[in-house]
Image (cartoon, rainbow, N blue to C red):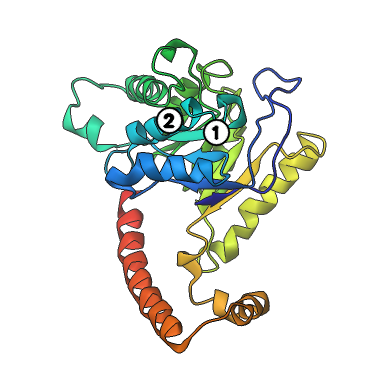
Amino acid sequence: MAGASASTDSPAGSDPLHPKVNMPRMVYGTAWKKDRTADLVYQAIKEGFRGIDTAAMKRHYSEELTGEGIRRAIKDGIVTREELYIQTKYTPHDDAFLAEPALYPTITSQVLASVTSSLRNLAHTESEEDTSYIDCLIMHSPFPDPVSTLEAWTALQSFVPHRIRSLGISNITLPELQYLVADPRVTVYPTVIQNRFRRAERRWDYELRRWCANQNSTRWKGEKRTRYQGFWTLTGNRADWPTQKFVRELAMAVPKTAQEVEALEAEAVAAAAAADETGEQKEGEQ
């Protein structure tokens, strides 16, 4: 699950390449849901989530089943497409591209294939794929070299603002981001910066979050248009939250039996072990 710092009510702004996007404060994440993805996305929307995050990365996501859950919720009248914020990701060095390099000889061809697939998977009805759009397309990580990152970004820009409303980038450092946006070929500014939000990583990503705040006050004249999305916030900081006063007060306010406490502690230990393993995998992949 990812959290956004604020939401906007208007679907379009005065700058055609940087339209305002209705981004909820909380976004439902779909990684590692596997065969349950469609049902869980449907349930999340039914329970009130209006933001959905997925990725064109079959190793950890099912973008197809995410779209299935969204279409089911729309068909059942729970929500309209206009009420949803849907974001997905283009993943550099994804398995699909590595498996058939002859089909995707350039980064631009990879981007085109990824976006085309995402628009098809996330179409809001079965019969209107040509009218589908994505609220935010996030580049899952920079490439190791800035030239390749720029090529991917400029390819993504070609879809804005019609099929893609806005762009973002994930797993990025402040120097990498500053280098990217300083290039004059970057005409679409990132709307979303999505990083792991951890005390152990760059002091809660303080410098990058401050950069986002400065963009909002200078480039956008106070409007919150460059948002920081934190993910892995709970499991990535499991040693920190018990020390927070508000967490202890909340825990004390919830009635619990001794058996429930023991069960919760056992579950927390298992979740921590799984998070460690997942974190190591993510470090190697991104």
The residue nearer to you, when weighing 122 against 180, is 122
Q: How many dots with numbers? A: 2
Who's the residue at 36% across and 34% down the image? Answer: 63
Query: In x, y percent, where is residue 172?
Result: 49, 47
Residue that label 1 marks: 78
The residue nearer to you, when weighing 20 against 149, is 20
Who's the residue at 37% across and 69% down the image? Answer: 271
Does residue 236 appear left or right of residue 101 in this picture?
Answer: right
Can residue 55 be seen here? The reply is: yes
Task: Please give the label number shown on residue 72.
Answer: 2
Amino acid type assigned to the residue bearing label 2 in the image: Arg
Does residue 268 appear left or right of residue 247 in this picture?
Answer: left
Which corner quadrant of the image does residue 35 belong to?
top left
Query: In x, y percent, where is residue 189?
Result: 62, 30
Amino acid type assigned to the residue bearing label 1 in the image: Ile
Residues under labels 1 and 2: Cα distance? 9 Å
Label 1 SS: loop
